[in-house]
Image (spheres, grey):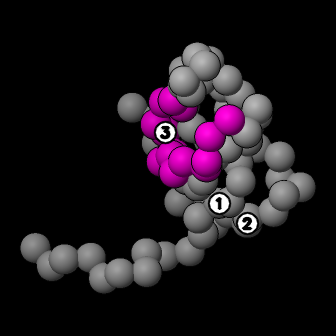
Amino acid sequence: MKKINTLRRIADGKLGLMAKTGFHCPANGFWRPADRSKDPVFVFEGSIMPATGRGSTVWYLEDAVVGPPTHALPVR
């Protein structure tokens, strides 16, 4: 299993992160297909990038998720 990177990431259009369908997602965030055929989808880092209705595609990071969780985690 891929280790999830916990370093902070910056949401910047110049960042230019991309991933192809079937490969591991390099960063948590909202990803949009290259052809803009569907709305951005949230993909967790380390997950497999999905296919669109048209099949395989290249995904571009639209908005990265940074910082600690906004909600408190439940106590065990």
Alpha-carbon distance for marks 1 and 2?
Answer: 7 Å
Q: Is residue 72 above or below residue 60?
A: below
Towards the viewer: 49 or 36 = 36
Where is the C terminus found, in terms of image quarters? bottom left
Mark seen at residue 64: 1
Tell me if 32 is positioned left or right of 68 in this view: right
Range of residues picked out in magenta = 37-50
Three-letter residue code for mark 2: Ile
**Residue at x 56% of width, y 74% of height:** 67
The answer to the question of whether label 1 and label 2 lie on touching residues, with beta carbons closer than 8 A, is yes
Residue 59 in sight from this viewpoint = no
Q: Quadrant of residue 38?
A: top right
First in sequence: mark 3 or mark 1?
3
- What is the x, y in percent for residue 48? 48, 30
Q: Is residue 33 above or below residue 29?
A: above
Identify the residue under disc 3: 46
Alpha-carbon distance for marks 2 and 3?
Answer: 18 Å
Q: What is the crowding at mark 3: few (fewer than 14 residues within 10 Å), some, or many (at least 20)? A: some
Which one is in front in this view, the residue at disc 3 or the one at disc 1?
Answer: 1
Q: Quadrant of residue 54?
A: top right
Query: What secondary structure is marked by label 3?
Result: loop
Query: What secondary structure is marked by label 1?
Result: strand
